[in-house]
Image: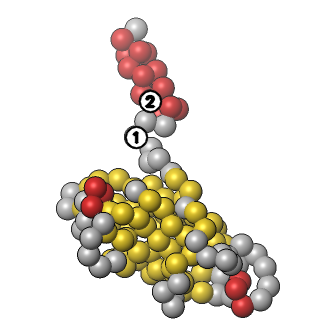
Amino acid sequence: MAACLGVLTVLGVRAAGVGQPDWESMREVASTVPITASLAVSPESGGTEVRMKCAYKAGGGAEYAKWTYTLVVVPKSGQAQEVNTWTARPGDEMELSAHSDLKESDIDHIEIRKGDGTPLLSLRT
């Protein structure tokens, strides 16, 4: 009986999502944004882990071309820190993980920027 309760407890914890990251949707900060994204931010040894899931809108025109993107951690004080760079085109879906040496409490917000530095999406931590 105790073994059954142990298995049910583990299954219940997994079903409830305990131990799973809390994903938060990023908000658009530019007029034309060809990407949607969610982030999960969590403390880890020596800083913060940032996990991202994103999708790239299908469409035509220059705003939907293959772009280089940068994931940027912006501290409450100091200079922004690039933590990952990637290239994507319309219809792509991606997941990635990055590390910042900043503690989560020292991070003001996280941005996804175009390769030219233009902020597209933002999430306050």
How many numbered marks are there?
2
Which amino acid type corresponds to the residue marked 1 in the rendered image? Gly
Q: Residue at x 43, y 67 (%)?
A: 110
Q: Nearer the viewer, residue 75 or 72?
A: 75
Q: Residue at x 43, y 15 (%)?
A: 4
Marks 2 and 1 close (CB-CB < 8 Å): yes
Distance Cα–Cα, label 2 vs label 1:
8 Å
Q: Position of residue 86 (x, y in %)?
A: 50, 81
Q: Which mark is residue 33?
A: none
Classify the position of the N terminus by image quarter: top left
Mark 2 or mark 1, earlier in chain: 2
Q: Which residue is mark 2?
A: 13
Q: Residue at x 52, y 53 (%)?
A: 24
Classify the position of the C terminus by image quarter: bottom left
Q: Kindly state the secondary structure of the residue where label 2 is placed.
A: helix
Q: Tell whether 121 sits left or right of 98.
A: right
Where residue 60 sits, quadrant-wise, is bottom right
Q: Nearer the viewer, residue 16 or 83?
A: 83
Q: Tell whether 68 sits left or right of 92.
A: left
Q: Position of residue 43 (x, y in %)?
A: 29, 53
Q: Position of residue 67 (x, y in %)?
A: 60, 87
**102 up-or-down from 86: above or below:** above
Badge 1 crowding class, 10 Å Cα cut-off, few under 14, some 14 to 19, many 20 or more, is few
| Residue lying at the far left of the rendered structure | 46
Where residue 5 sits, quadrant-wise, is top left
Which amino acid type corresponds to the residue marked 2 in the rendered image? Val
**Would residue 67 be seen by someone viewing this image from the given angle?**
yes
Q: Which residue is mark 1?
A: 19
Q: Kindly state the secondary structure of the residue where label 1 is placed.
A: loop
Q: Position of residue 7 (x, y in %)?
A: 42, 23
